[in-house]
Amino acid sequence: MLRNIDFQKLNKNPTPFYFYDLDLLRATIKELKSEAQKYQFKVHYALKANTDDRVLDIVSNEGLGADCVSGNEVKKALEHNFRAGDVFYAGVGKTDTEILTGIKAGIGCFNCESLQEITVINEIATKINKTARIALRINPHVDSKSHSYITTGIEENKFGIQLWELDEVLSVVRTLKNIKLTGLHFHIGSQITNMDIFKELCIKVNKINERVAGEGFELSLLNLGGGFGIDYEDPAENPVPDFKSFFGTFNKYLKVRTGQNVYFELGRSVVAQMGTLIAKVLYIKKGRSKNFAVVDAGMTELIRPALYNSVHKIENLSINGQEENPSEIYSTYDIVGPVCETTDFLGKGVSLPVTYRGDLLAVYSVGAYGQSMASNYNLREKAGVVYSDDL
Ligand SMILES: *Cc1c(COP(=O)(O)O)cnc(C)c1O
């Protein structure tokens, strides 16, 4: 499937590696910007999805802001020329050092997840005689209905300030001199493709926005978070997510008060489809009930299947790419890695043309939460990246 890519050029690189289609990344951002601009929505990129240097340079050159969830991500965003004012910082566990880094850098906003965090930010800002801009990350109790490990907006999750604590939080915020409450922040989960869930979010946000305004706070920022999903089943059919529906839904249901700017923080939908993990088949193990294709990549390069049971489309490029003798006979494989864990698989029950040692497999849609979640467990080497621009 890998469009316009010469198999022989790919095959020259040592496996495993991530292949990043930077043209697709640029096309995705172009579409994203044109749909967001229709409604003057501002879009930030959630760095944690992919912090590859060349990816970040493209994103920052396109003028998106940055959404960070650690002090090092804040630093990385600044190194890649995201404007400090366009850097937002969320996360339930910001350390004092990370908070200090953010305040000194003059970042646009701390998205605060607890009352205690707000008081700590105020203390640190007071010490260095600065004012920190904050937004309240509110847990709106909207179920994203994606995998329970990537749901963040229901009461049992660790994220955000609960609605029942909001009055107390607002009354404390009034007394703190070195913070400025500028907005409200929501992020309910990830890989959400059902627009009804975002509609439900809008309805909750509208109520909360009115309630906070009713308490006398003039807020300039409404941040609706990220979470927009992509098509893992058929990446070739839908390489660019349907940003028109996504932003259109918010435009339709969100009631923005005068003077408020609307922000989004998208990660997966920006970068997922541009990335493909290329792995080589080491061994075929024939079983009585199924076959294993043991490849040279695994949970160390792509942990999503092990962590969330997520499904990525997998193809055998050697057969599709060479087209000398395309096999008509298919067999079913569990595609597993070399790591000593039972959960070390890339795909289960995958139907492929009969596959041999030495074949190259493509695991699609790994641009988000692939490389950025990689580890060197089992002392494995870090996989490299091959960029379409260099081929
Ligand atoms: C992870 C995260 C995002 C991005 O989520 P995607 O599903 O990748 O769009 C946005 N905001 C916050 C606070 C996050 O933690």
Image: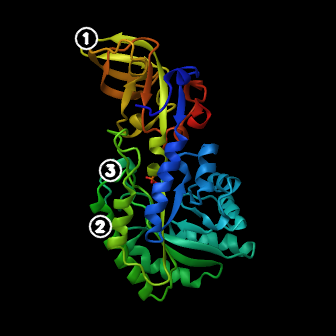
Are the residues tagged 1 and 3 within 8 Å (C-beta)?
Answer: no
Give the left or right position of residue 288, taking residue 302 as reference: left
Write down the residue under mark 2. Answer: 200
Residue 155 x/y as whole percent: 35, 62
Number of the label disc, if any, that sits on residue 118: none
> Which amino acid does the dot numbered 3 rest on?
Ser
Q: Residue at x 47, y 67 (%)?
A: 37
Task: Give SS at disc 2.
Answer: helix
Write down the residue under mark 1. Answer: 288
Quick one: label 3, few (<14), some, or many (20+) residues within 10 Å?
A: some
Is residue 48 or residue 263 the one in the foreground?
Answer: 263
> Which amino acid does the dot numbered 1 rest on?
Arg
Q: Which residue is drawn at 36% across and 77% down?
A: 206
Q: Residue at x 66, y 51 (%)?
A: 76
Going by the picture, which residue comes out furthest to the left?
289
Q: Distance between the residues labelled 2 and 3?
A: 15 Å
Number of the label disc, if any, that sits on residue 146: 3
Are the residues tagged 2 and 1 within 8 Å (C-beta)?
Answer: no
Which one is closest to the eye, mark 2 or mark 1?
2
Q: Distance between the residues labelled 2 and 1?
A: 48 Å
Numbered marks: total = 3
Task: Give SS at disc 3.
Answer: loop
Is residue 308 or residue 246 the one in the foreground?
Answer: 246
Sooner in the amino-acid sequence: mark 2 or mark 3: 3
> Which amino acid does the dot numbered 2 rest on?
Glu
The quarter of the image holding the N terminus is top left
The quarter of the displayed image where residue 181 is located: bottom right
